[in-house]
Amino acid sequence: MAAGSKRQALGWLARYAALGTLVGLGALPLVMAAEPANRPLVIRLAASAVLAVALAHVRVAARGAVDAEPPSPFEQALRRRRPAAPDLDQRFRELLDDVRHGPASQRYWSRVAWPRLVGLAARLPGRAPLEDPPRSRLRRLLGLGPNLTAIRGLVARIEDRS
């Protein structure tokens, strides 16, 4: 053991001795006030408080020692990141949002999704104009847009090349 590490170890030993003394002095009135049958319990609680502090310091020191080591190949393989997802075109993301949120809200469907789909169909040559898909009475009462099957049919009509 080097001289610096001996000095450091003695410093920690002195700190824990001081902590044990302070906890013992704090627990002494409790030990004296407790019934004789409960005195060992109070002493054990005081000792466990000192032990908890010591173990917390040991845990921090052990974690620091482990973190100081270079990572193993296994840890490096765990840390490798998957390549980032490719950036999607803004229009595609908007249409994806339309498909996700359109069935959930009639307002979203009628003000955002439906105009975009009509605009998309109008830009394609030779396509018949789209008709607003029918909704069931329950979906109308709940304020929901068309179901996904109806949206799928609209998209299929837009994609239809014949």
Image (cartoon, rainbow, N blue to C red):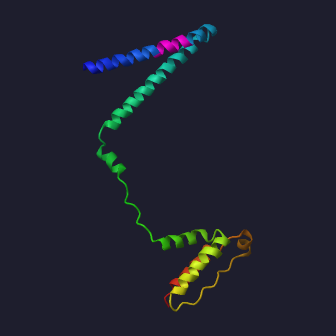
Q: Quadrant of residue 59?
A: top left
Q: Position of residue 42 (x, y in %)?
A: 57, 14
Segment colored magenta: 19-26
Is residue 42 visible to us here?
yes
Q: Count the numbered circles shown.
A: 0
Where 82 falls versus 129 (above or below)?
A: above
Residue 41 vs 149, above or below: the answer is above
On the image, the x and y values in percent for residue 54 come to: 44, 22
Main SS category, magenta section: helix
Q: Is residue 23 magenta?
A: yes
Is 49 located above or below residue 37 in the figure?
A: below
5, above or below 150, in the image: above
Q: Residue at x 43, y 14 (%)?
A: 17
Residue 98: give x, y in percent of width and height: 57, 72
Q: Would residue 146 be visible to someone looking at this image?
A: no
Residue in view at x 61 percent, y 78 percent: 114
Left or right of 80 on screen, residue 24:
right
Position of the N terminus by quadrant: top left
Q: Residue at horizontal 48%, vertical 19%? A: 50
Residue closest to the eye, 76 or 120: 120
Give the residue at the far left of this rendering: 2
Q: Is residue 116 a member of the stretch shown in magenta?
A: no
**Residue 25 versus residue 78: which sits nearer the camera?**
25
- Relative image position of residue 64 (x, y in whole percent): 36, 33
Q: Residue at x 45, y 14 (%)?
A: 18
